[in-house]
Image (cartoon, rainbow, N blue to C red):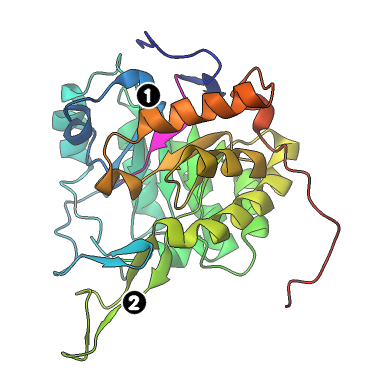
Amino acid sequence: MSERGSDPRLAVDFCGLKLATPLVLLSGCVGFGEEYTRVAGYSNRDVGAICLKGTTEAPRLGNPAHRVYETPAGMLNAIGLQNPGAAKVVDEILPTLDFGETRYIANVSGSTVEEYEAVTRRFDDSPIDAIEINISCPNVKEGGVAFGNDPDMSARVVEACRRATDKPLITKLSPNQTDIAENARRCIEAGTDAFAAINTLMGMAIDIHARRPHIGNNQGGLSGPAIKPIALLKVWQVHQVAKAHGVPIIGQGGVASAEDAIEFLLAGASAIGIGTALFYDPLILPRINAGMLAYMERHGVSHVSELVGALVPNGPGSACV
């Protein structure tokens, strides 16, 4: 993998994968990779890894329009996992990607435990670097969020995917559950190698004149800066469980600046997911990397890994106001 021009102070080891920077482009935001890597000004030295679009066993058409709606400080989306199916992704799309350019992570989804296992097995026999298990998609009507909100079901999916591959498994956790730390613990026992926290929150927007939801699926996943405080808390809660097992976290949810990225690192993330910000600023990555380096220089930090989990919490208090 070419890392020419990358600053070694930002290079990270994530599940044995050498990433040029901690920045990971999130699933669904850059298609299957080639849509983003051909953007004028793109440089692989600014990217640690790219998560491909969510993939199911059979092709899916996705949800009815409208699928995307801008909200204050964020965005609702309900794409519905539109994709050409695992066979086409592996046989036709992956061969077009330059695996010497960056790391590529598949994103696996399904409506049954058996489908998750089958799609994971398909990607196991491919050049993909790691596999993200999407057990927390809030905009499909079956599977997805039901698996992600039930620790027993989450563990069953992870166990099935673990049987199907020796590649690093990254479990994408839902914020729409009662106890994300307990879910993380069960997933670690089931064999996950890492976490991505968090996926979008369920939300709605309403057209008051038509008296109908703006989103064709009625509800969708809320992303963007609006969810960052929630995402930070969830990353910190997962880190309390994961750190004892050496399980790293991709922290994500509203990252739009170097300051945001550093907050997630301090909360316990080892890598940082960038998603919604790419829609309005496709070339935000070099500024985030430069900002992290500037912060490190100001605070005498020699390597970005020194920031991971370095949060000093205040004393215990009530969550009530």
- Residue to which mark 1 is pinned: 46
- Mark 1 burial class by Cα count in 10 Å: few <14, some 14-19, many 20+: many
- Coordinates of residue 64 in the picture (x, y in percent): 14, 70
64 with respect to 13 (left or right): left
| Image quarter of the N terminus | top left
- Mark 2 burial class by Cα count in 10 Å: few <14, some 14-19, many 20+: some
Q: Which mark is residue 142?
A: none
- Coordinates of residue 241 in the picture (x, y in percent): 71, 47
Which quadrant would residue 257 be assigned to in this image?
top left
Q: Which residues are magenta?
A: 20-27
The structure residue drawn at horizontal position 79% and vertical position 71%, both measured from the top left corner, is: 318
**Which residue type does callout 1 highlight?**
Asp
| Image quarter of the C terminus | bottom right
Considering only vertical position in the picture, is 51 above or below 97? below
- Classify mark 1: helix, strand or loop: helix
- Residue to which mark 2 is pinned: 204
Q: Nearer the viewer, residue 294 or 190?
A: 294
Identify the mark nearer the N-term, 1 or 2.
Answer: 1
Is most of the magenta stretch helix, strand or loop?
loop
3 with respect to 166 (left or right): left
Farthest residue to the front: give it: 298
Q: Nearer the viewer, residue 278 or 49?
A: 278
In the rendered structure, are the residues bearing label 1 and label 2 in contact, judged by CB atoms less than 8 Å apart? no
The structure residue drawn at horizontal position 53% and vertical position 24%, both measured from the top left corner, is: 293
Alpha carbon separation for disc pair 1 and 2:
34 Å
178 with respect to 44 (left or right): right
Considering only vertical position in the picture, is 271 above or below 305? below
Q: Does the magenta portion include 23?
A: yes
**Which residue type does callout 2 highlight?**
Met
The structure residue drawn at horizontal position 67% and vertical position 45%, both measured from the top left corner, is: 239
Q: Nearer the viewer, residue 140 or 218?
A: 218
- Coordinates of residue 222 in the picture (x, y in percent): 38, 64
